[in-house]
Amino acid sequence: MKDNEPSGPGQKSLSFGLERLGLVPLRWTWLTGVVVILLTVAAYFGMGRLSVDDSLSELFRTDTPDFHNYEEMSRRFPSSEYDVLIVVEGKTLLERESLEKLRDMVIELQFVPAMRGLVSIFSARRQLSGGEIPPPLFPAELPTGEAYEKLIKEVRENEIIRGKLLSDDGQLTLIVVALDREKVQGDGLRVAVREIERIAKTTLEGTGLTVQLSGAPVMQLEIRNAVASDQFTYNAIGFLLGAGIAIAFFRRLSLMIIAALPPIIGIIWSLGLFGYLGFKLNLFLNVMSPLIMVMGFSDTMQITYAIRDRLIRGDTLRQAIRWSILVVAPACVLTVATAAASFITLFLSESALIRTFGAAGALSTLVAYVAVVTLVPFLALILVRNADGLAAHGRRQAAGSNSDRAMNMLKDFCGWISERVAARPVLFATGGLIAVVTLGTIHLSLQPRYRLADQVPDKEQALAASERLDAKLTGANPIHVMIDWPKDASLYDERVLKVIGAVHEIVESQSGVGNVWSVETLRRWLRESGDGSPQTLKKYVEILPEHLTQRFVNFKERSAVVTGRIPDVDASQLRPVIERLEALLQPVRAQNPDFRIVVTGLTVVAARNSGSMIGQLNNGLSSEMIFVSALVGVAFRSLLIGLVTVL
C-alpha cells in the first residue's frame, strides 16, 4: 500500500463516509468558494434577524400547571414584570432638603414617556376625615422646625409606607415606576430605563443619597447588554487565542489562517441559521460561539497539522489534503456526532429554553463540521502557493530547528504520555475507572442550587439594589397569591373580602415574607380611620388611579392578588416557605371551595421547577454517556471500545 493511501481495500470508514464532503473542494475548488461566499452573505442577513431573549421566566417555561398559573397571573396583573424599583438610600434621607429633592425627582419621573404609574412615599395620604378625600401625607410646602419633626414621625409610623416603601431606620426608600408594556418593546426598554436613571441621579446629585435601580426591566436590560457584550468578547478572545496558538505551532501565516478562519465562518453560519429559525440569543445560547470555536479549532488544527505533515513526507498538496481528509476527518465526524448526541439528550427536559439550547447546540456542531471540512481544503488550495517550499521549511524544522520548538515539545510530550500508558495499560485503566466511580459518586451527592440572581450579571446595579432591599425591606422578589371569586359575587361582598383578608394574614405571617400588599392593606387603613365598610372601600378604590387598583384587583376576571416580597435566596430555602404557605392556605380553600386560591409568581415557579430541571439535566447527562458510548462502539464496530469510552 502506498504511503499516501489512507486505507486498504478491506477497511470500512468509521464515519460512514461523511468525511468525503471534504473532498468536494479538491474537485470543484472555485465552485466551493462561490457557495461559501453565498452562504456567508446569507448568514450575515440571518444574523440581522437575531434578537435577545432577556426574559427572566423563559428558563422555566414548561407545559405545567405551575407555569400556566404564572402566565395567567402575569396577564391579569402585569405590573411586577414592568416595575422599575428605584432604591434611594442615605442617612440624610428624611432631612427636609433631601425630601424636597426626592419629591422633585418623583415629579419629574411622571414625564418619562414610557411611565404608566408611580408609587412612592409621596403617594400616601392622611386618614379619612368626614368622608372626604384625604389630603396627601406630605403637604405642598414642607413645614419647618417642630412641625417638620412631627411630620417625619407621622411618616415613619404610617402603616401604608412603613416597612413597605420606607425602611424602619428611615434611611432607605423604594420608588416603584410602572412602565407601559407597549412602550418598552424593543429599544424602548433601554431608553426608558436610561431616562429614569438619568433623572434620579441628576436630581439627587449633591444630597449625599445613593440611587440604584432594580426590578425585572432593569435586570432584563442588563441581561440584554451582557449577552451582546459577551458575544463580542467570546468571539474576539477565542479568535485571538486560536490564531495565537496556530501561529506559535505552524509559524506560517497561511497555515494560521487555514486553522483559525473556518471556526469563525462556522460561528457566522450558525448564528445566521439561528436567526432564520427564530432562535433568540440568551445566556445559554451565548455559549454557542465559544463552543463552536473550540470544536472547530480543534478539528482544523488536526487537519492542518496532517496536511503539513504529509507535505513534509513528500506528498503533493492535493495528495496531502486528500490523505488528511480521509484519515483525520473521520475522527472529526465522531467528535461532532458525540457532541450532537449530547445536545439531543437535552430534548428530554421539560424546559422549552433548555430544549431550544439542545436544538441549537446540535445544529451548530453540524454546521461547524461542514464549515471545517470544506473550508480547510479550500483555504489550503488557495493559500498554500509554494507547497515545496513549505515542505522544505518543515523538514528543516523537524530536523531540530529552534523555530519549531513548540511543535517538537508537543510531540515529545504526547510521546512521553503514550509510552507510559502503553507500558502500564492495566494501571491507567484502573485509575480511570476509580476516577469515574469517585467523581460520579460526588456528582450524585450534589444538591441543586439556584437563585434568580444567577441569571443577572453580578457586576451591575440591579443585584446591588436588590441586596439593599433584601436587607432593609425584606426583599425585592415578589411572591403572589391569586384569588378568584365566584361569578355571583363581587369584590365588595363580605365573604370575598374575608377570604382576601385571611390570605393576606397568612402571607404576612410567613417568616421571610414582608412588604405585603393587597386590597386588605387599604381596608385596614380605612378601619384605622374609623370606617372600613365595603361601601367606603368601594368609594376609595374608584378614586384611586387605575394603575394602582390593577395591581391588586382585576374586576373583569373576578380576581384579586395578595403580593409579598421575599429575599433572593437559594431555591432550596424558598421551597419550605412556599410549602408552609400552601399548607396554611388549605383550610381557607376547604372553607371556600368555590374560590380558587393559587400561590404563584416567578419566584415560586423558580423554586419549584429549578430542582426538577437540574435533575432532568443530570438524567440527560447520564443518558448522554450511555448514548455516546454506544455511538462510538457502533462507529468502531467494537463493544470493547464502546465500554472503554466511559473512562
Image (cartoon, helix red, strand yellow):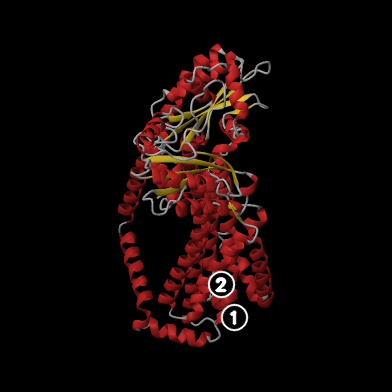
Helix, strand or loop for disc 2 = helix
Q: Amino acid at mark 2?
A: Val
Disc number placed over residue 376 in the picture, else none: 2
Contact flag, marks 2 and 1 (Cβ < 8 Å): no
Residue 543 horizontal/vertical position (percent): 61, 29
State whether residue 48 appears in this view.
Answer: yes
Q: With respect to residue 452, does 381 lie above or below?
A: below
Q: Which residue is mark 1?
A: 382
- The correct choice, above or below, for 386 with respect to 457 in the image is below
Quarter of the rendering containing residue 495:
top right
Q: Position of residue 35 (x, y in %)?
A: 68, 70
Q: Foreground: 574 or 613?
A: 574
Residue under the point 59% across and 71% down: 375
Q: Residue at x 52, y 84 (%)?
A: 387
Q: Nearer the viewer, residue 60 or 302?
A: 60
Q: Nearer the viewer, residue 203 or 188?
A: 203
Residue 41's image quarter? bottom right
Residue type at mark 1: give it: Ile
Q: Position of residue 329 (x, y in %)?
A: 54, 65
Judge left or right: residue 77 versus residue 468. Answer: right
- As drawn, 463 above or below 67: below
The local secondary structure at tag 1 comes to helix
- Residue 171 image offset from top left, x and y in percent: 36, 40
- Circle on res. 623: none
Residue 19 in view in this figure: no
Question: How far apart are the alpha carbons under marks 2 and 1?
Answer: 10 Å
Left or right position of 571 against 545: left
Residue located at (49% from left, 47% from top): 104
Of the numbered discs 2 and 1, the one sitting upstream in the chain is 2
